[in-house]
Amino acid sequence: MFENIGEIVLLFWRTLLALPLAWRQRQKVFEQFFEIGNASLLMVCILSFFIGGVLALQTGPLLTEKSLGSYLGGIVGYSICRELAPIMMSILIAGRIGSAMAAEIGSMRVYQEIDALRTMNINPIHYLVLPRLVAMAFALPMLVIVAILVGWFGGAVVAEGNNHIGLSFQAFYFSLRQFVESKDVANGIFKTFCFALIIAVVSCHQGLMTIGGPRGIGRSVTKAVVNSIVLIVIFDYVLTRVLMLFNK
Amino acid sequence: MNASAPNPYGVSVQVRGLRKSFDGQEVLKGIDLEVLPGEIFVIMGPSGSGKSVLLKHIIGLDPPDDGEILINGESIQTPEIASKYRLALVFQSGALLNSLTVGENVGLYLTEHRLKSPEEISKIVSEKLEAVGLKDVADKMPNELSGGMKKRVAIARALVIEPQLILYDEPTSELDPLSAVVIGEEILKLKNEIHVTSIVVSHDRELAFGVADRIAVINEGRIVIIGTPDKMKKTSDPLVQRFLNADFKREPQTKSL
């Protein structure tokens, strides 16, 4: 992965330079946006509901035992919006959509479709990478907003329904409002936006670099997912550290 | 590129001292050739002799290690060449975009460069598909077509560009003899009607001798001979003779029972 970091940065830069052309590619952007949202929304809801639920289940009884049950909404809400929803949903999307991007572009590369574009003087970055990057940059943060809300709801359901916690919806909501500020949500959304760029650029890069036949496509898909996840985790730490400076 | 510009003549192509290696193995070992405007130039040779690699260099898909390719005297590697001359390549596999319909594939160049309105593009697509003998396929997906139809769609896609130079990579491979004749006739029609320069890479001796103004034989990355079809037939070069006259030798059957 790290030997290709220069190529990935260059691809990102070239795609950024092509951003003024995004409106011309709006139809492809909408197609990709629909593809990302439609393919992942249900999965995002299920995953985030249970992440919120399990977080409440793990921390709730302990907090209640120590008479700190009223903090549960804040702890679940804060963890989900700042960390769990952005990173878990980004990993999910890297697996579902990043792999599909790498496979589609990789197959186009192997079957000379990208060469055909170049002979028609159509830039593959404008035609293939730009719509995917823009769509991902919008779709993933929106999915994470949904994930945050559903995650909070999952936490609240478990907090009320579990006998060892017994925190009402209202109390959970009050605690959440007390501890979680809008800047915490914005913090998570900003990180997600960065992760979306990582997934799109890394996956498209792997697709464009594909060589060989079906085995090459398989290799590209694996690399796209693994490299995206590794970079997401590294950038998560870096971004968290940087954002902490601004949040002081 | 400007697809609406007239195309009175094809362009000339010069290849000078072209060398290319992949992983240390030299595939092209100093190719020199010149193709005249409006000429049909056929490149023949055994499998693995470097024909398709040469074609990719001529259209600028691959950069040479050494040597140069000139289109009307200008290097193919200069960035402006793509906007100055209209070049097209018909891939061996067709290389149609599988996510688009046949009609969208054929009109892709015009759509992406916004050269015509959607109505005009639709009309041009129908015309070009009809020109290659295909009707009512515009709404089909490429995977619904036969190999021969895909090749003809690829030619239609190239025609939309109104090319000054059109390159064909094995245009008749995997085709039945009747479809191969149709493709050959298309190549000749383009030369006669729009005077396009054509470079055809092929194993097909029937096609080569049927359409070529001149033929080059390439072997192990080197040009062995260049000449008219008549000159080819008369040459005494043993490799060329072996390649052009290769045929099955079947032993006469004897009664074994």
Image (spheres, grey):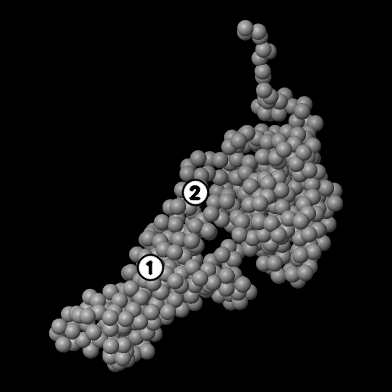
Quick one: label 2 or label 1, which is nearer the N terminus? Answer: 1
User: Residue at coordinates 83% horizontally, 57% vertically from top-left?
Assistant: B8
What chain does badge 1 belong to?
A: A
Tell me if mark 2 has few (under 14), some (14-19) or many (20+) residues whose alpha carbon lies within 10 angstroms of its own.
Answer: some
SS label for mark 2: helix
In the shown orientation, is residue A119 left or right of residue B131? left
Where in the figure is residue B16, as x and y percent of width and height? 65, 46
Q: What amino acid is labelled 2 in the image?
A: Pro
SS label for mark 1: helix
The numbered dot on residue A91 is 1
The numbered dot on residue A214 is 2
- Which of the pair A197/B22 is nearer the observer? A197
User: Residue at coordinates 39% horizontally, 65% vertically from top-left?
Assistant: A228
Residue B203 visible somewhere in the drawing: yes
Q: What amino acid is labelled 1 in the image?
A: Ile
What chain does badge 2 belong to?
A: A
Q: Quadrant of the C terminus of chain A?
A: bottom left
In the shown orientation, is residue A154 left or right of residue A121? left
| Callout 2–callout 1 Cβ contact below 8 Å | no
Q: Is residue A66 above or below residue A206?
A: below
User: Residue at coordinates 83% horizontally, 48% vertically from top-left?
Assistant: B189
Where in the figure is residue B51, as x and y percent of width and height? 63, 41
In the shown orientation, is residue A90 left or right of residue B170? left
Q: Is residue A126 above or below residue B49?
A: below
Where in the figure is residue B211, as x and y percent of width and height? 79, 40
Tell me if mark 1 has few (under 14), some (14-19) or many (20+) residues whose alpha carbon lies within 10 angstroms of its own.
Answer: many
User: Residue at coordinates 53% horizontally, 58% vertically from top-left?
Assistant: A104
Residue A13 visible somewhere in the drawing: no
